């Protein structure tokens, strides 16, 4: 797709577009601009897709969490969290019901109905059983899952799961020096890759691969605030 300068409408050469930094230079008028903004303005569909790919940037206002996220200050720290609800569940849930339900009934349901155990068929069905468990857990995370970050004094706790069931990682806040958003595997879910919140220091911790960009950015901002030593005290705010 040809990029045109938003100021003079001249065509911009490919060599004058830096994709990695999202900066383009118009040789005709000397204007610099973000090509992603030009593309999004020219196509509503592309705008929707780009907003899902390009993470938000800038400071975070803990008093204004995005939809599906919350922040609660406490005497010795805070608790912040975000839902892992995802529109992909509209496709994944029906698919899981058909694929997992059909395979499990065909392989194991028929054995139960007949009251006869078939070892070869049961062994054959193990990959389907494992796949079904993974699909069901993904569906739960995409509908009612959450990520919760708690900081109390120097104690850090990160929970990823559904209700009381999930994985909790703990550590000391002083073990980490920086917080960033990176692309890679979540150390809490090695089966899923994507943009994650990454804590680096004497040890490394990554999480949040199932969060949307704005929710992940919000939780990363809350952790950056904690690491900076500044403790804001907004009222409890939740945008569910």
Image (cartoon, helix red, strand yellow):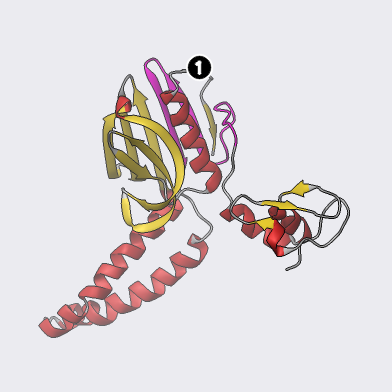
What's the residue at 69%, 57% (across, down)? 17
Within the magenta stretch, is there residue 70?
yes
Within the magenta stretch, is there residue 173?
no
Is 133 placed left or right of 142 in the picture? left
63 lies above or below 210: above
135 lies above or below 218: below
Q: Is residue 116 visible?
A: no
In the picture, the quarter occupied by the N terminus is bottom right
Q: Which residue is mark 1?
A: 233
Q: Which residues are magenta?
A: 58-83
44 lies above or below 66: below
Residue 81 percent across, percent down from the top left: 44, 36
Outermost residue toward the right in this view: 8
What's the residue at 60%, 35% (across, down)? 58
In which quarter of the view is residue 156 placed? top left
In which quarter of the view is residue 139 placed? bottom left
Is 36 placed left or right of 53 in the picture? right
Residue 179 percent across, percent down from the top left: 43, 35
What's the residue at 51%, 24% (across, down)? 236
User: How would you rate the neighbour count of disc 1 (Cα within 10 Å): few for under 14, some for 14-19, many for 20 or more?
Assistant: some
Q: Nearer the viewer, residue 212 or 38?
A: 38
């Amino acid at each position: 797709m040809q990029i045109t300068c938003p100021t003079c409408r001249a065509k911009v050469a490919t060599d004058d577009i830096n994709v990695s930094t999202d900066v383009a230079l118009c040789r005709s008028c000397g204007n610099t601009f973000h090509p992603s903004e030009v593309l999004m303005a020219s196509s509503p569909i592309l705008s929707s897709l780009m907003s899902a790919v390009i993470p938000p940037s800038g400071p975070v206002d803990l008093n204004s969490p995005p939809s599906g996220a919350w922040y609660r200050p406490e005497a010795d720290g805070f608790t912040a969290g975000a839902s892992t609800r995802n529109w992909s569940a509209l496709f994944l849930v029906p698919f899981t019901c058909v694929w997992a339900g059909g395979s499990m009934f065909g392989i194991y349901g028929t054995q139960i109905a007949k009251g006869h155990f078939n070892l070869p068929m049961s062994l054959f069905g193990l990959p389907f059983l494992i796949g079904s468990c993974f699909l069901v857990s993904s569906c739960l995370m995409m509908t009612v899952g959450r990520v919760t970050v708690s900081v109390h004094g120097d104690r850090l706790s990160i929970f990823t799961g559904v209700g009381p069931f999930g994985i909790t990682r703990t550590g000391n806040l002083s073990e980490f020096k920086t917080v960033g958003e990176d692309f890679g595997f979540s150390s809490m879910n090695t089966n899923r890759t994507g943009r994650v919140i990454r804590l680096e220091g004497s040890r490394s911790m990554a999480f949040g691969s199932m969060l949307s960009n704005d929710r992940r950015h919000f939780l990363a901002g809350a952790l950056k605030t904690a690491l900076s030593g500044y403790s804001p005290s907004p009222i409890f705010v939740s945008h569910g």
